[in-house]
Amino acid sequence: MPQNELEYYERRAEAEIELAQKADHSAAVRAHYELASAYLDRIHGDAPKSTGGLFAV
């Protein structure tokens, strides 16, 4: 994966974690952490575990 993609996924994961920490509703917290996890999976070469269809292969 190109470096610019890795950097993008890292920034997105960090942003989602920050949003999760600021969210008030438990469903929003969970959604943000799931997105962060999917981005981190991409960085580490794993197939995303999220079933939200955000990273269809």
Image (tube, helix red, strand yellow):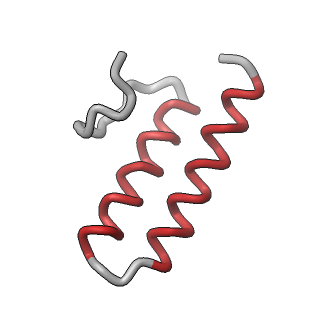
Number of disc labels: 0
Describe residue 4's horizontal placement relative to residue 16 as left or right.
Answer: right
Residue shown at 26%/76% (left/top)? Answer: 26
Q: Quadrant of the N terminus?
A: top right
- Is residue 31 placed above or below 46 in the rendered structure? below
Residue shown at 36%/83% (left/top)? Answer: 24
Counting from the top left corner in percent of width and height, residue 28 is at 32, 68
Describe residue 54's horizontal placement relative to residue 51 as left or right.
Answer: right
Q: Residue furthest bottom?
A: 24
Q: Quadrant of the C terminus?
A: top left
- Is residue 32 placed above or below 54 in the rendered structure? below
Counting from the top left corner in percent of width and height, residue 2 is at 72, 18
Describe residue 15's horizontal placement relative to residue 35 as left or right.
Answer: right
Q: Quadrant of residue 23?
A: bottom left
Counting from the top left corner in percent of width and height, residue 27 is at 24, 69
- Is residue 49 placed above or below 32 in the rendered structure? above
Residue shown at 59%/48% (left/top)? Answer: 12
Describe residue 15's horizontal placement relative to residue 5 as left or right.
Answer: left
- Is residue 34 placed above or below 50 in the rendered structure? below
Residue shown at 35%/70% (left/top)? Answer: 29
